[in-house]
Image (cartoon, helix red, strand yellow):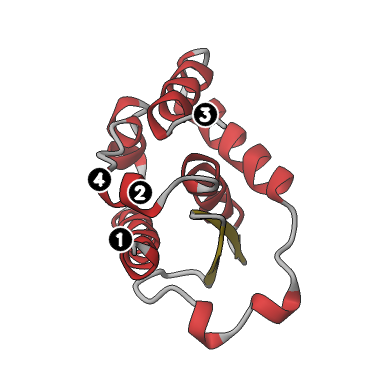
Amino acid sequence: MKTIKEQEREIIDEFSVYDDWMDKYAYLIELGTALGAMEERFKTDENLIAGCQSRVWLHAESHEGKLYFQADSDAIITKGIAALLVRVFSGQAPREIVEADLDFIDAIGLTSHLSPTRSNGLLSMIKQIKYYAIAYNK
């Protein structure tokens, strides 16, 4: 299993091949499509992320001291952003998730190219993931 930093470096490398932000959006859409659908039983109000313009669900489970995330959204770019976060955080220890800096978000230019509502949604997703990590950090 790769560390959070290794996942971040990999994502930075993948995004670095695209010069144009339309291509980066297309890649985000591709990542969202590849994420697939979340099991319907997890699409509950409890798993709905507050602060997102679109509907975003995030579910976490703990196995052998690691957290595993599932996410889905009714907006395809948002689902791509969720896919990045799931990729970085799934399979990590709660303590590592809480301490993660998430440098990749600025490094790939995500924060500067998202609308204010999508930026708020991104921050809300990160906050929820860290809340899960705090709750599971024993």
Which residue sits at x=74%, y=70%?
Answer: 39
Which residue sits at x=28%, y=52%?
Answer: 98
Q: Tag count in the figure? A: 4
Mark pair 2, 3: CA separation: 13 Å
Q: Do the residues labelled 2 and 4 touch (CB within 8 Å)?
A: yes
Q: Residue 99 carries which label?
A: 4
Measured as percent of width and height from the top left, residue 133 is found at 37, 61
Instruction: Please rate how many residues cluster around mark 4, counting C-alpha atoms within 10 Å: few if below 14, some from 14 to 19, many from 20.
Output: few
Local secondary structure at mark 2: helix
**Amino acid type, callout 4:** Glu
Q: Is residue 98 left or right of residue 69?
A: left
Pick whichever, 95 or 101, lies toward us. 95
Q: In which quarter of the image is residue 68?
A: bottom right
Q: Are marks 1 and 3 in contact (CB under 8 Å)?
A: no
Local secondary structure at mark 4: helix
Q: Which mark is residue 120?
A: 1
Q: In this view, does 131 lie to the left or right of 86?
A: left
Disc with the residue nearer the chain's start (1 vs 2): 2
